[in-house]
Every structure is written in C-alpha cells, then in structure tokens.
Image (cartoon, rainbow, N blue to C red):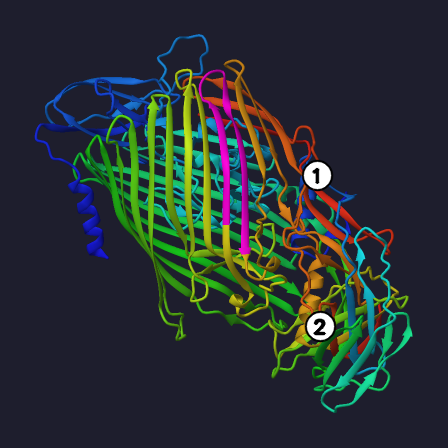
Amino acid sequence: MILKHKFRNTYIGSVCRLLVVVSLGVGLFSCVETVQLDLRSIEPQLVIEGKITDGTIDNEVKITLSQDFQKPNEFPPITTATVTVTDLTTGEAELLSQTSPGVYEIRQLKGVSGHQYKLLVTYNDSNYESTSTMPQKVPFEELKYQEVTRMESNIRMVAVYNDPKEQTNYYRWATIGADGVRSRAYFVRSDSFNNGNRIEQVIDSGMDIQAGDRITIEMQCIDKATFDYFLTLSRQQGQGPNSGSSGTNPPTNISGGALGYFGAYTIALKTTEIK
Amino acid sequence: MTRLFLLTVTLFVSLQSVSQNKFTLSGTVKDAKTGELMIGATVRIKELTNVGMSCNEYGFYSLTIPQGSYTLVAGMMGYAIQETKVVLTSHLKIDFQLTEETATLNEVVVKARASNDNVANPTMGFERLAIKEVNQLPVLLGERDPLKIMQLLPGIKSAGEGSSGFNVRGGNVDQNLILLDEAPVYNASHLLGFFSTFNADAIKDLSIYKGNSPAQYGGRLSSVLDIKMNDGNNQNYKVGGGIGLIASHASVEGPIQKGKSSFLLTGRRTYADAFLKLSNDENLNKNTLYFYDLNAKLNYTLSGKDRLYVSGYFGRDKFGINDLFSLDWGNATGTVRWNHLFSEKLFSNTSLIYSKYNYEVGVANGSSQFLLTSDIQDINLKQEFSYFPNPQNAIRFGANVIHHTLTPRTRESTGENSSVNTTNEPNQTAFESAIFASNKWTPTTKWNVEYGLRLSAFTVLRKEGMEDPVKNYVNLEPRASASYLVNPSLSIKAAYSRNTQHLHLLSSSNAASPTDRWLMNTNTIKPELADQVSLGVFKNLKDNAYELSSEVYYKAMQNQVDYKDGADFITTENIESQLLFGKGRAYGAEFLVKKKTGQLTGWIGYTLSRSERQIEGINNGQWYAAKQDRTHDVSVVGTYQLSKKWTLSGTWVYNTGNAVTFPTAKYRIDGGVAFLYSERNGYRMPDYHRLDLGATVNLNRKANRESSLSIGMYNAYGRPNPYAYNFGQSADNPEITEVSRVTLFQYVPYVTYNFKF
C-alpha cells in the first residue's frame, strides 16, 4: 500500500490514508509514485542563516546559494562575505571569521536574554541586515515519551515546561537522534492556545524512534520572526492534497533580498533513553 | 427605501393597460402518477401564438386573455402533451395532470414536442436539469450526485478530482449560492468533497444561473444553484432504496390526504467505517469515518388558495483517529413556505428559512486537549409576489431579511490535565436585507425582455461587548436580459447583471476543508461586487430536437479577498491582518450542443476561458491566473437507450490543468531543505481527462414497481490524473529531492441496486 510516510502527521494525510484503506475494501485504487516535473531553473539566490544562542554551540552565520530543485542537495558556500554581529544592548561588535567554507563563527559575543543583536553581511557590494532580540529563557522541566497511535504506532517525545504568562512565547523543538544526527523536521509552537500553563508538548520529530534509542530534545525559545519563519517551513513539509498551491515562502527578517533568517534564541537540552 | 420600492412597483404596474373583457386562466400542472408539481412545464394557448408561460417553482400558471374559445395546451419534456378546450367567459381554474411518456420505442405516443423555450426566453447563462435526466449517468462509486452532473455543463468546472465543489465562470467556490428549498447550504460536501450533500432520492430539479440570476436571488457573485426537493407522492405510498458500494439510501413517501397532501422522508448513510471495523489492525478499527443525510418534506393543501410546505435537511460527517483527533461537521436547514393565491393573477409565497453550518475539531495530544467549534447560522424571512396582469408581463416583487450569526471559533479546554485556555470570540451578527422587483416582458412576438432591480443592504451589528460602530453597506443591483427571435428557431440574447456578496470563505489551501472560515463584511472587508455582461446565440435544429447555443461573457469583480503568503489562520487572533484585497476578471466563450429526444440523448460542451486576479501584495501586484483558470474545458455526455431493458451511458471530460504554485529552487536551512516557491500560481497541473462508462438494466418495470441494477466504471481508461504533487526529500537518498504524484481513482468500478415500489 502506497501512501507511505509522506502523509504522516497531517490530518489530511490521515484522511487520505483512511480513504485508501477503505477503498481497498471496495476495490478502489490510489497511488503515489515518483515523477519528473519540468520545474524552471532560476538564478541562484543568496541564503543567510544567522544564529546566536545562550549556549556554546550553533553561534554562527552560514552563507550559501540556493540550488535548482532537480539537482542534488549541494548548496555552494559563499566564502567572500564580510560578516559582523553587534550586541546593540552593549554596543559590542564582532567581525566574524570563516571557520569552514561559508561558515562564519561568533566567538566573542555571548547571547543574553533581552539583548538585541544585529547582523550585517556585506557581499558583492550589497548589504544584508537583520536584528533579533533573544527571548527570556523558559526552563525545560522534563523529557518524557509516549506511544501515539494514529495510523500506526509511533514513539513520540514529550517535553514538559511551564509557559510564562506575562509574554507571548515561541518555541522550537529539535530532535537529535541516537547517532547524534539532527532531525530535519521543523517543529515550532507558540503559546497562543495555552499561555501561562504547564504544558506537555508532544513533538513530531520526523524520525522513527525505537526502543533502546537515546534521544535528545533541544528546546529553543525563539522570537516571533524566527517562529513565523519556521512555521511556514513546517507547512512546506506537511504534505497534502494541495496541488502545491498552498506552497508559500517563509517571511525573512533579513533586508536586502536574501533568503533565510537571523535569530537569537536560548537553548536547553535533555536526553532520555527509550525503554 | 420603502418609498423607492413602492415607486418601483407602481411604475411596473402602471405599464399595464387595464381591459374590461379579459379573464384569467390559472391553475397548476402536476405529474399524474406522483402528484409532484411540475416546475417549468409550459402552458400555451393554441389559438394565440404569443401566449404561453412556464410554470413557476410551485407548478403554477396564470394567463389573462380576452374572452373567447381556446385550446389550452400543457406539456413538458418526457411527458405526453395534454389539451383542454375552454370557453372563457369568466375566470377559470384548470389543473393539469401530465402522464410520463413510457420508455417505448415502437409504440406511437403523442409526444410533447420539444419547445423552443430555450431560444425564445430571455434568460441567459441558465441550465435546468431534472434529476430523471441525469440519474443514469456514470458517477464515482455509483453515488448519484446532482452536483457532479452539473459540473459537466459549460462554464461550470469541478474544483478538483472527484470534488463536489465547483467554479462558475472563473468565480471562486464560495461565490456559488447553493439553495436547497430556498435554504442556503454553506458546505455542500461530504468526505473531503468527494460526495455532495444532495441525496438524489430527495431531489426533483436543479437550476443554475451562471451570474445572470433574476432579481429575487442575491448574495453571491458567480452563480445561484437552486435545488428543489421532491414534494412526495400524493397518490400512493412508495418505498424506495438503493444499495451501493459505499452507501445505502432509503426513502418513504406517500399521501397524507390523497391528491392533496403528502410527505417524503429520505436517508442515506455511508458504511465505509464498516470496513474499518472489520480490520484486525487495532490502529485502524478504532477510527471513525462516515456521513449521513436526512431529508424530509411535508406539503399540505389547506384550501384551493393555500398550500403549505415544510422541508428540512440534516447531514453530518464524522471523522476520528482513535481518541487523538476528531472532526465532525454538517449542515441543518429548514424551510416553511406558504403559497397563497390572492387572486387568479396574484400569487404569493412567504418563506421562513433556517440554515446552520457548524464544525467541531477535537484534539487530545499531550496536554493539548481541546475542542474547537465554529458555526454560521441564518434566519431568513422572505415575501415574494408573482403578478400576471396580462400575457405580455409577468411581474415578480418582494423583500427578504436574513439575520446572520457567525461564531468565529470557540476553543474549549477538555480533559483534566489540558494546558489549553478556553476562549470565546464574540459572535458577529448582521442583517442582510433586500427588496426586489422584476418583469418578464414580451412586447412583440420577436422580443422577450426581463429586467429587474435589487436593492440590497448589509448591516454589520455591534459585536457583543465591543464598541464597534454599526456598519451599513447598501448596493443597487440592476439585472437585465433580452432575446430577439430572428426566426422561431434562432435568437440573439444579451444580458447584464450586478451581484454582491457579503460573506466570504477563506481557504488556506487548494483542497476545500470543512474548517475553512467564513467571514462577513467589516470595516476592512468590503462587499464583493461583480458586473457581468454576456451575449449569446441560440439555435434549435430538427424541430427543436437539437439545441445549439453559444455565449460569451466578461465578468469584472471588485473587493476580492485573498490571504497573504504564509498566512496563519490558526493562531492569529486578528484574521483581517492576514488578508489582502484586490480585483478579478473572468471572460470566456461557452458552446453547447444538446440533444434532448430520441434513443441517444446528451450534450457536448466546450468552454474557452480565462480567470485572473490582481491583488496588491501577490505577484508584485501584477495580474495572475486564478487557481481555477483553465483555458480549455470539454465535456461529452451521452445516454443511449439500447432497449426497454438496457440503457448505456458515458461521459468524457478534458480540461487544462489548474494554475498552481510549485517550487523552483531549494536551499539549506538548519540541516533541512527548504523550498523556494515560484510566484503564486506560476505553474500548471497537467491536462486532465477521464472517461466514465455506465449501464443500467431495468430488472422489473411493472406499473407500480421498478428496480434496476447499475454498473459502471469511473476513469475507465485509467488516466493517472494527479490529485496532488508532493515535494520532499527522497526516502532512499536524503541528498536528493523528488516529486511524488498522488493519483486517486483509476479504474474505479461500481455496482448499485435501486428499487421503488
């Protein structure tokens, strides 16, 4: 049966799967197959991904170019950019040095909640700018897991935390698998439904989690621009009978015409073993 | 406003000359076997070439002519013609009961000659289908569905594979006013749109106006689909039913008082979920998936001058994944109508109409445990008069007031350890009111003109507990159409109409979802406006056996609503901040050849059209193709009566693919791959085509019983029409991206058994 993992996690997908199951009973058929579409080729676009955290990892700015859809996932790095990050709250500025092709590392500046940071990238005589304010850190209380049965049984990680009432909070949850590999799924939530409460967040990790795995969840407290960015990206990953027409591009907070985002966020990690 | 209305009515009436020696012939036309009133049956005076009319939606006619001796002729397609001699020296009431032509090929029967009404009448952009004409056409899974058949007419396009949603002349799906016995049905689809809410057992007749509706209709830009339920047999008790692959249906009807009053009750339920229950897989058999429909109607003849109709519809879809997720939606409508004859010339109908659509989404995932509910509810009072002063004029006037209540979305926390906060968005309420008058005027034998005016108002009322000012939108909507008969089988027609729309449906994706949001006008959201002009040529051949027609139209639309790229309808409190406004234009040419009599009946339709939008904030404010823009659209529909026993049928459709948005490039974000989408609707789906075949065998057709077996196949040559394209990383190789095509419904056979006795 052919509607495979593509449809997982979405309500429409579930309906489709159900339909297929029902259809089998009445001899109806539906199928998914890989096809070639004649997609246009465009001029490569500049992509900037800037991150500053309150931790020791991921403090870097990556600059790459976009690639045609049909080509392999190889994204040419930009090695000749000038990158500066400034803590606008303290006035401290840092000129970043390139540590590997297209990766410019932040070494001196430390992410502090409440501080506003500014990114400036100069490349080919063009300036690309953005700012982001690091949100308040919300403590990551506990990491659990549970079995969730939709069309099939899956183990899902569950993060427990107390959402602060005073402000609107935005979270991103990243899963790091047994082998240390980060999931490529984008999973974000805001507190618009549950502001100020104790929350048990079931996470769609986008990977198969088995008994015996050691799973790490990274909790990120992100700002609104980063949230909006990843929310749109997560919709690109959600599949459904949209014929591609709901496909939209995430709103970038970088001026100057580059793709990508610049985000200051806090991180907290918890690891647990699935028994 | 009242003064203006009175003035209009006076103006209409004063056009008529009063004559002393004229009398009125009036009455109703019914089906002899069932007692059903016959909408659109024609009544003519043989001796007066220019005198005749089509019965109104209650089967009523009224003709005022000079005294004398006449032959009154009543007829309708598929029924034997009836003639009555009258000596008219006073007002006369004459009712007709027409007998259905039996499906005999050799016997000579007095057939109702096909009339040239389609050529002569001034109505444009109009189609009427009697449910009997279309019941034998092949359909998906054998579920006879009037909305699917409707989509085979030129200018009306399916919103997607197997979808009951449709686009009329480039309009959006929410720009169709779908009326069931006058009650609006806000969501006419079941099960992801694969089935419509209209159970063929309960339906008598459908009419669609493609933007040129008469003045009594209003509230949507693109079309009015007016569906009438059967009244119920007032002669004999009948039980009918059908067993199909996914659903079964049953109906009971009969007289309450023979010949005078009757009832009808129909029901339908799918049993897809029964297959789930059969599954051994626990993950499957705890899921829910079904829908049902109930239709009921009563009609009472209170006196020679009064008739009362009560009708109702209730339908629901239930869908659930274990205890994790549930979605449940449906419509409820109710209509009470009172027909009263003030005189032979003045027919009145008073309607009280109720309609409600609501949905509930239940989620229980971690501490996310909540129920979302939303509903839209209407109460509508409508008064309409038809006045027939003389054979040259038929005047209609009236007024209606609708009270809308919209509960945008209520979120209720469920379960003890739910972390969700309960909220209650205040209800929005509004009055939508209108007065209207129109006249169907036949000044000479060559000219037929219908002109009318609708004055509509939409009054947004103060939200509960809020200080919003009351906002009032008033619009004048002129409507006019005319036909000129070059000869009895050839005419040229022209029409203009303006329509307004005050309720707007926001869909965040191509696939209509039951949770799509209805919005009403506010200070920011203005009424949608459309002006449509059309021109047509109508020609009948071979004694009206073949009908040829072609219409060209141009429609300009203002205040169109769309969503911003990446709009978030779920968590955003202020939905208006996610909207964009602009304009639209749609134009095209429609061609239709229809054969209505003989062993082979059916039609061929072709539409060449464009539908475009210009919205500030989308595609840099340039004109772009609307999703439903399809250059070519062809449909071929045929039914062949092979013998008394066997009927064969087939449909073939072909259309240019929808305009869609696909990715043109990709880029790396946080280890994953993000897609860079093209401009809105910058790509095309491949051409769509499909052949459906069906056969019906009458197993038993005695005077009072009938049963038949239908078999067929949807998409008989298995064209893999894409339902969706999904873009993602290859499951086998995460370093490449690929496109997968989802195809539904190839070679889908069906078998249904229907009976009535």
Q: Nearer the viewer, mark 1 or mark 2?
A: 2
The quarter in which the N terminus of chain A is drawn is: top right
Q: Amino acid at mark 2?
A: Ile
Mark number for residue A254? 2
Give the amino acid type for the residue marked by disc 1 in the picture: Leu
Q: Secondary structure at mark 1?
A: helix
State the image coordinates of residue B85 (x, y, percent, origin top left).
Answer: 19, 17
User: Which residues lie in the magenta part?
Assistant: B585-614
Asked whether residue B338 appears in the rendered view, the answer is: yes
Q: Are marks 1 and 2 in contact (CB under 8 Å)?
A: no
Using the image as rendered, state which of residue B156 and residue B679 is in the foreground: B679
Is B590 part of what is drawn in magenta?
Answer: yes
- On the picture, is A199 further left or further right than A66? left
Q: Is residue B663 above or below residue A57?
A: above
Label 1 Cα crowd, 10 Å radius (few <14 / some 14-19 / many 20+): some
**Residue hosting label 1:** A24
Chain of the residue on which disc 1 is drawn: A
Q: Which numbered tag is attached to residue B698? A: none
Magenta: main secondary structure: strand
